[in-house]
Structure formats: structure tokens, C-alpha cells
Image: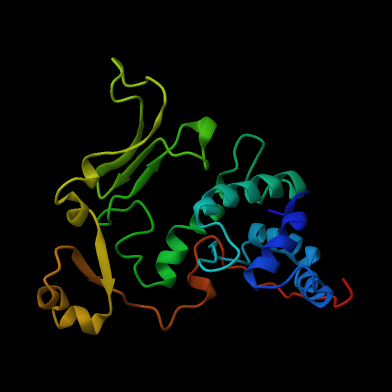
Amino acid sequence: PYTVNTIDEHLDMVMITHHLNASIPEDIAFADSRIRKETIAAEDVLQDMGVFSMVSSDSQAMGRVGEVITRTWQVAHRMKEQRGLLDGDSEYNDNNRIKRYIAKYTINPAITHGISDYVGSIDEGKLADIILWEPAFFGVKPDVIVKGGLINAAINGDANGSIPTSEPLKYRKMYGQLGGNLQSTSMTFVSTTAYENDIGKLLGLKRKLRPVHNIRKLSKKDMKNNNATPDLDVDPQT
């Protein structure tokens, strides 16, 4: 989200990402020109309006893939402070905002990649991937990670302790990561052509294979709780 520290950290990130030299004034000027605080601030508002349908992180450059969920809910919190309640919400709940933001990193990416029949939401027939949170640590540190119906990881105490809550508490592998459970609780997504030609048998794969489909005709209206398409005017001076 756009906060007091957002702009300060960008210059160094841009310099490093683009292999620039801090001793060259032109490089610093180039990096500085790439940082537009007004654009960054506007992105938060567009996310809150449902204009941007998804949240992701750059895997090769600036971006913290491990903080996608944390930052998503920070934006939601900041936008509630700045813009107030969304239509349909009240002083007692933020259900519509919650549904909007959770869709940005679950069902909407699944729809976009053609795999929403298998993952992306808690529905009958889909892979049972569920994250359980302690309310105090929601969006920051999961309590239990369930993958395909089996506990994959959880916070446990010292293995030598007499009780399970002995510190230090840290994430440990659970049954879902042992033996053949890794293969039975996950999927590999392939093209329809590869699936029809039984590529799993050809390559000797143990994981379940599922074909991606229904991608080419997708449009903005297919995005859940994030399908707004307003007219946007960009002021080049600001």
C-alpha cells in the first residue's frame, strides 16, 4: 500500500533492479523518473474499486512474493481508513470488501489461468487447499496450512518439549509433506492437447494432471467481485 515509507525504498530498488550506478547522476535521474508516487497511490484506490482484478508479485525484479497476502490486506485496511465503507458493508462487517480482496489472489487468478474448476475457492469437487489463521495474525502468519485435505504445515513447538507449545514455535512439516502425500494432494496443470495425449503416462508422472481450459474468451466481467470498468482520465501533470 501507499504509505509513508513506500517512496523512500523505491529508489534503491529501482537502481539495483535495473543494474544502475549510484555514482552516475544520469542513472539516478533515470531511476527517479520511474518512481511516480501519484500512480502508486492511485493503484490502491483502483484495487479498492475493483478495477484491478488481481494481486501478484514480480518474480524477477521488484516485488516480495512472500508478502502478497500480507500486502493485500494492508491495502484493504488502508482503503477502509481512506475511503470508508464499501456499498453493502456496515459498521458491523466488511464482508463485501473482504470478498473483493480475497478474490484477488484466489479465484480470479485461477479463472485467468483456466484452472478455476480445480482450485481457487472452497467448493465441492475442488482441491481442498485451506489456510487457517489465528485472528491476531491474519494475513501475516498462517496457523495451519491444509493442502488437498491433509495438513501440510503447522506451527509447532520444540520437538523435545513435553508439550506442543514449547518455544521456539516454528513451521514444521506435517503429514501432507511426507511420502506419497505430496503427489496425491497436488496437481500439475497442462494443456488440453498434452492431457488428451496422456502425457502423464508418457513421462511417468505420479501427480494428478488437469487440463487448463476456457481461457481465450475471458473478459473483465468474468472476474469475481472485481469487474469494474470505469472511465479513467490521466492528468499528465500530476
- Against 237, residue 186 (above or below) is above
Q: How many numbered discs, if any?
A: 0
Residue 14: percent from left, percent from top:
69, 67
**Quadrant location, the C terminus:** bottom right
| x, y percent for residue 84 | 73, 46
Residue in the picture at 49% in, 62% down = 224
Identified at 49% across, 57% down, the residue is 103
Q: Decide if residue 120 is on the left or right side of residue 78.
A: left
Drawn side of residue 179 relative to residue 214, left or right: left
Horizontal and vertical percent position of residue 140? 52, 41
Residue at image point 18% right, 49% down: 181
**Outermost residue, right side:** 237
Q: Answer above or below: position of 135 versus 54.
A: above
Residue 99 visible from this viewpoint: no
Instruction: Inspect this view and state whether residue 138 appears.
Output: yes
Q: Residue furthest top?
A: 162
